[in-house]
Image (spheres, grey):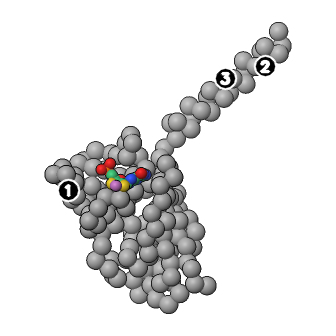
């Protein structure tokens, strides 16, 4: 039964590759108008300067830990601090989630040298690594009045400069 054998073998290959994609380590990417695109794993974020914020939603207090978005963008070579001037001020960042949710932030608001908002790329909540429907990474904005920009399942930060 050579044909039956071939069918079985290809089904086996499909099963193995599907399992590998399920087990793949979660990453968050930084792409677009940066000098260095990044693909960051939890271990990469663990090695960067760490920060934490406290949020309260419906009386539930959560402490998120992670890395400031500005630190991640700085690592990718985005213009921040003294370099955030002129055409660079027309830059925005799309926070893209794996369910298709997308939220736009201006680079200026993400820069703590420019603005008073807090934007944390969180990988832990209350001391536990994020998982499940929140995804491994969440963009937490404790200074916002509503939770809508708190992007769960964050998969990438896409950087776009409007002015050429
Ligand atoms: N990926 C993703 N993130 C998301 C949403 C979404 O639909 N998809 N909804 C947002 C909205 S409208 C709110 S109010 C908060 C709710 O977060 P919570 O479920 O942790 O309270 O998640 C935000 N982040
Ligand atoms: Mo919401």
Q: Quadrant of residue 162?
A: bottom right
Classed neighbour count for the residue bearing mark 3: other residues with Cα under 10 Å, few (<14), some (14–19), many (≥20): few
Q: Quadrant of the N terminus?
A: top right
The kind of secondary structure element at disc 2 is: helix
Classed neighbour count for the residue bearing mark 2: other residues with Cα under 10 Å, few (<14), some (14–19), many (≥20): few
Q: Quadrant of residue 20?
A: top right
Q: CA distance from mark 3 to mark 2?
A: 10 Å
Residue 74, horizontal then vertical, whole percent: 44, 73
Asked if residue 3 is positioned above or below residue 35 in the image, the reply reads above
Q: Where residue 56 is drawn, which disc sits there?
A: 1
The kind of secondary structure element at disc 1 is: strand
Residue shown at 78% from the left, 19% from the top? 6
Q: Which residue is mark 2?
A: 6
Q: Which residue is mark 3?
A: 12
Q: Earlier in the sequence, mark 1 or mark 2?
A: 2
Q: CA distance from mark 1 to mark 3?
A: 48 Å
Residue 93, horizontal then vertical, whole percent: 48, 69
Numbered label tally: 3
Residue that sits furthest to the top in the current view? 1
Residue 61, horizontal then vertical, whole percent: 18, 52
Kindly tell me whether residue 42 is visible in this rendering: no
The kind of secondary structure element at disc 3 is: helix
Residue labelled 3 has its Cβ within 8 Å of some atom of ligand 1: no
Residue 113, horizontal then vertical, whole percent: 33, 81
Residue shown at 37% from the left, 46% from the top? 134
Kindly tell me whether residue 26 is visible in this rendering: yes
Asked if residue 112 is positioned above or below residue 12 in the image, the reply reads below
């Amino acid at each position: 039964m050579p044909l039956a054998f071939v069918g079985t073998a290809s089904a086996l290959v499909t099963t193995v590759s599907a399992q590998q994609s399920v087990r793949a380590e979660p990453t968050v990417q930084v792409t677009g108008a940066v000098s260095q695109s990044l693909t960051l794993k939890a271990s990469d974020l663990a090695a960067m300067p760490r920060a934490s914020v406290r949020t309260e939603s419906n009386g539930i207090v959560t402490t998120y830990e992670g890395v400031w978005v500005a630190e991640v963008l700085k690592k990718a070579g985005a213009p921040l601090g003294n370099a955030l001037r002129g055409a660079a001020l027309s830059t925005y960042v799309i926070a893209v989630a794996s369910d298709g949710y997308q939220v736009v932030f201006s680079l200026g608001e993400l820069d703590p040298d420019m603005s008073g908002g807090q934007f944390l790329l969180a990988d832990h909540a209350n001391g536990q690594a994020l998982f499940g429907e929140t995804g491994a990474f969440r963009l937490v904005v404790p200074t916002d009045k509503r939770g809508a920009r708190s992007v769960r399942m964050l998969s990438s930060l896409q950087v776009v400069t409007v002015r050429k």
